[in-house]
Amino acid sequence: MSHRPFPGRRSVLRGSLAASAALTLPAAVGAAPALALSGRPAAGWGVQTGDVTAHSGLVWVRSDRPARMIVETAATESFRGARRFHGPLLGAGTDFTGTTRLHGLPAGEQIHYRVLLADPDDPRRTGEPVTGTFRTVSARRRDGVRFVWSGDLAGQGWGINPELGGYRIYDAMAALDPDFFLCSGDTIYADGPLTEAVALPDGRTWRNITTEEKAKVAETLAEFRGNFRYNLMDENLRAFNARVPSIVQWDDHEVTNNWFPGEILADPRYTEKSVDVLAARARQAFSEYFPVSTLRRPDGRVHRVQHHGPLLDVFVLDMRTYRDANSPDDQTTGPQGILGREQLEWLKRGLARSRAVWKVIAADMPLGLVVPDGTDGRPNFEAVAQGDPGAPLGRELQIAELLRFVKHRRITGTVWLTADVHHTSAQHYDPSRAAFQDFAPFWEFVSGPLNAGAFPASALDGTFGPDRVFVKAPTASNVSPAGGFQFFGEVDIDGDSGELTVRLREQDGAVLFTKVLQPGRVGQ
């Protein structure tokens, strides 16, 4: 194995880093800051890094008042010889959040950084620095790659419960000291209000931290922003963000359940019925609260590819923004599909050009698992599969086109990762079992939720021949995190052999299932 034993190359900062990540939050953390506060700017919501490359990365912070963002980087915690980056002025227009791009960083090295918030009228007046660390992408194959993934945070009425230690799953993920965290969507539940207490089936009571913005469904920009701020009230998440960079995508609950472009809501909880209006507000808040490189481009897109050295390319999909309407999904033509034509062609080009050993396709929804979306005369469907095991129909047509392309271009090392369905499983897709057979075998791994209701295993659709090799899920619906069934996945790519090992893990880090994949194969 190329990885040195812990701590080794993956040495982690405790002590000062943990202390800075656990800074006391402002008393009004759930509300807009009071601009008349005395003293110096404070960053009680911690720091984050995202979309890290070999020589760059994005650093995020939120201030409690107007402030100038300054980032200093160094090779050690002492910050001797620190390099300074001047960031934006943080103000009400971005909910006092901001992102600074670091550049010219050394590849494959641990970067220590601290964020200073300066008084705009007196740059000498700065708040207490908030520190973090991350590793830049290594150009050396022998260093290998390790990352974790999951999704679905604070859903179905289950928020931050201090009696259970809050979002403890982040501690288990941090213990593996991953190179990055792939967040597979449902980063908030804008459509999921929280109450202070929920009665559990066993007679116990679940107790949530609550805020004004989490008391109803999010409709205004301020309410969407409050949903993102809510999760940052959790000490475990803030500590995790300070030491593990993220690759973040979104799905439906950043806006509302099972949404699609052009939808008009019938849900009586909403006074704003246009999903397009809600999605625009949600996207703005999402871009303010996560360091995502492409959201700062003119097209503001979520889909992108993150290159992680010679071993790994991560293709981050957006299966929400460009999809067609949810429907019985049995049409024989599907030009829009779930990705949209432009994103599909982008993905095909990227996969064909990639020289990485492994191409992880980060999907915010599964392929062969049936996800219903109510009825409108006939059952409607939310994901790709619609339960008909025959030839591809509806959104399956677009996935069939992609799978055929991968096979005929002899693209090796594709692996699909997702969350969304609130259980964990491993599916192997094989043309010998499928109605559509013009593709090479591949694996899809499902994990999550992070802190949300757990649900029974989804039914399988036989169109692409899935075999569910492993699954762990409850038999009841909306099991609280107190009942278990909270999951994350780990991917470990060995730098010597190139083998990719997937481990599906429980909330405490216990391994449930392991699969080792060999490099250089079109299908396996």
Image (spheres, grey):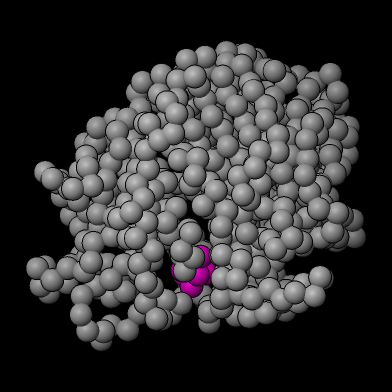
Spot occupied by residue 159 in the image (x, y as percentages of width and height): 61, 68
118 lies above or below 326: below
> Residue 228 lies in magenta, yes or no?
yes
Residue at x 50%, y 40% (from the top left corner): 176
- State the residue at coordinates (60%, 44%): 509
- The correct choice, above or below, for 383 with respect to 19 in the image is above
Q: Is residue 293 left or right of residue 149?
A: left
Residue 144 placement (x, y as % from top left): 45, 24
Q: Is residue 524 covered in magenta?
A: no
Count every numbered label the image shows and give the total.
Answer: 0
Q: Nearest the camera: 73 or 7?
A: 7
Magenta residues, dominant SS class: helix
Q: Residue at x 56, y 19 (%)?
A: 499
Q: Is residue 66 visible?
A: yes
Position of 123 with respect to 186 (left or right) is left
Q: In the displayed structure, does residue 397 sit left or right of residue 88?
A: right
Q: Looking at this view, is 369 or 40 the one in front?
A: 40
Q: Quadrant of residue 209?
A: bottom right
Which quadrant of the figure has residue 310?
Answer: top left
The spot of residue 145 in percent (x, y) is: 46, 29
Task: Report the span colored magenta.
Answer: 225-231
The residue at 54%/29% (across/down) is 492
Q: Residue furthest bottom?
A: 36
Against 204, residue 406 (above or below) is above
* Residue 49 can be seen, yes or no: no
Return the x and y of residue 5 as percentages of the image width and height.
Answer: 45, 29
| Quarter of the image where the C terminus is located | top right
Q: 350 or 78: nearer the eye?
A: 78
